[in-house]
Amino acid sequence: LIDFLTVAATVMGITTSASFFLQARKILKNKSAKDISEVTFALMCVGFTVWLVYGIVLGNIPLIISNSIGIVGASFVLALTLRYQKKK
């Protein structure tokens, strides 16, 4: 049961973290980040980083993998948002 829960948690973490790439694809396709909050994605990057450090301290591979993907995805969306945000 514990092995199943570990695998399930890992798959859910990776799936959730990878979802940022769908937002990135939409920004790239539309060449627009209108209505995307850069503050939200900056905070997500901070949160993923804290969880990643926690996973490293624990030696917890599922935490490390899912939060590493989350950092990359959220950072990518943040970078695209800053690149394509509407000029004020």
Image: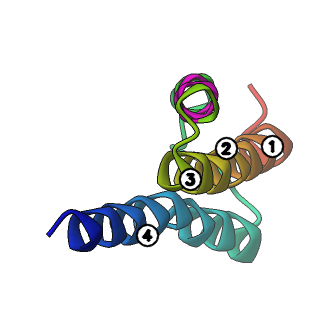
Element class at badge 1: helix
- Mark 4 lies on residue: 15
Q: CA distance from mark 3 to mark 4?
A: 15 Å
82 displayed left or right of 62 = right
Q: Relative to the observer, which residue lies in front, 19 or 67?
A: 67
- What secondary structure characterizes most of the magenta part? helix
Residue 73 in the image, given as x and y percentages of width and height:
66, 55
- Mark 3 lies on residue: 61
Element class at badge 2: helix
Element class at badge 3: helix
Closer to the N terminus: mark 3 or mark 1? 3
* Vertical arrangement, residue 5 with respect to residue 64, above or below: below
- Mark 1 lies on residue: 79
Q: Which mark is residue 26?
A: none
Closer to the N terminus: mark 2 or mark 1? 2
User: At x 41% / y 58%, what residue is drawn?
Assistant: 13
Give, as a three-letter code, the residue at label 4: Thr
Q: Residues within 10 Å of mark 2 (few under 14, many from 20)?
A: many
Instruction: State the extent of the magenta-drawn residues as a range.
Output: 48-55
Q: Which mark is residue 71?
A: 2
User: At x 66% / y 63%, what residue is drawn?
Assistant: 24
Q: CA distance from mark 2 to mark 1?
A: 12 Å
Give, as a three-letter code, the residue at label 2: Ile
Residue 49 among magenta residues: yes
